[in-house]
Image (cartoon, rainbow, N blue to C red):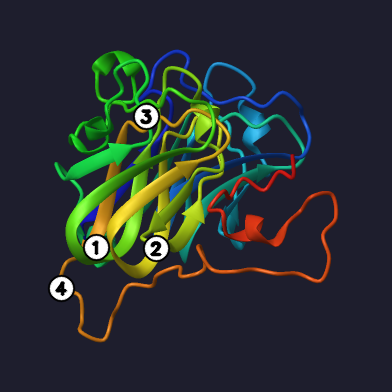
Amino acid sequence: KQWYQRRVAITAGGANSCTHTAGNRNNRWELKLIEKFQIDRVIVHNRIDCCQNRINGAKVFVDNQYCGVISYVAGRNIYPVRCNKAGSTVRIEQPNDYLTLCEVEVLVRSDLHDNVIKARGNILSKGKHTSQNNVGWGGLSSRGVDGNRDGRWGSGSCTHSSSTTKNWWTVDLGKAARVEVVKIFNRVDCCQNRINLAKVYVGDQFCGEIIYQDARSEYAVDCHGAVGSKVSIYNDYSYLTLCEVEVYGFFDVPSSAVALKNIGPGHKTSQNSVGWNGVPSRALDRYRVGHYG
């Protein structure tokens, strides 16, 4: 069989390439995959220059499904754990000691991996027309679909708004499409947490929002085949910086599939009473921050 191997580490090896928790109890490490895969095995590479026995008793999970436990063997630094379970999250727990991981490999069959990727469709957004509410520091909207995923600002491939609130970015796909997944590549050299709570829409259809995770640069939002010709990302809380946006889906939209449109704005609203100036029209003002102030 052929195997697809995904390595997850800050660096590929050598010095400064091991994780380490601050406490010695109830520790966990977690990997969020961009899709759900049938995971055959997880291979854990242990530290070799000190404290090797700390890995003893570490447990491996796929989503919340238990795969196995690592039993420390003196002189051994590689521990494969068989899973054969489907999921999108790999978690390693160490309840009784520090948790140090010098490499984690997540292995799935290459043919199954390819099937999952194909189900997302093709990239529909590369090179398409884009717009955004404003531009800061030369971060043009077109940078979001230039095909360059480099998350360093100096690469000249990240968008940037000039305002700190109520920001939006849109790509026009040119025609209606079934959008399966929107992948967003975040900035990596500064201010990564600004992406937190950014929301993804296909037309007026809400797909989901990004929850920022430390050290993660790539986020996938599932749109479940929403039909539309424009994909938008909103950030009401901070600057909006996108180092690449990849919209996956299909242009062959079935005749039975139609785009949904939000028809509420512009119509008359009412409510039984008004407190603290919370007039009913606010519910249709397209301002989705969620903070009363």
Residue 96 in which image quadrant: top right
Q: Secondary structure at mark 2?
A: strand
Of the residues shown, which amino acid type is indicated by label 3?
Asn
Q: In this orientation, which residue lies closer to the viewer: 263 or 256?
A: 263
In contact (CB < 8 Å): disc 4 and disc 3:
no
In contact (CB < 8 Å): disc 2 and disc 4:
no
Of the residues shown, which amino acid type is indicated by label 4?
Asp
Of the residues shown, which amino acid type is indicated by label 2?
Cys
Q: Which mark is residue 134?
A: 3
Q: How far apart are labels 2 and 3 at the CA level? A: 26 Å
Residue appearing at x 64%, y 22% in the figure: 51
Q: Secondary structure at mark 3?
A: loop
- Give the answer, above or below, for where 53 lies relative to 169: above
Q: Which residue is mark 4?
A: 252
Dot in front, 4 or 3: 3
Task: Give whichever of discs 2 and 4 has the lower sequence position.
Answer: 2
Residue 46 seen in the current view:
no
Residue 282 is situated, as x and y percent measured from the top left of the image, at 65, 55
Q: Secondary structure at mark 1?
A: strand
Residue appearing at x 39%, y 23% in the figure: 11
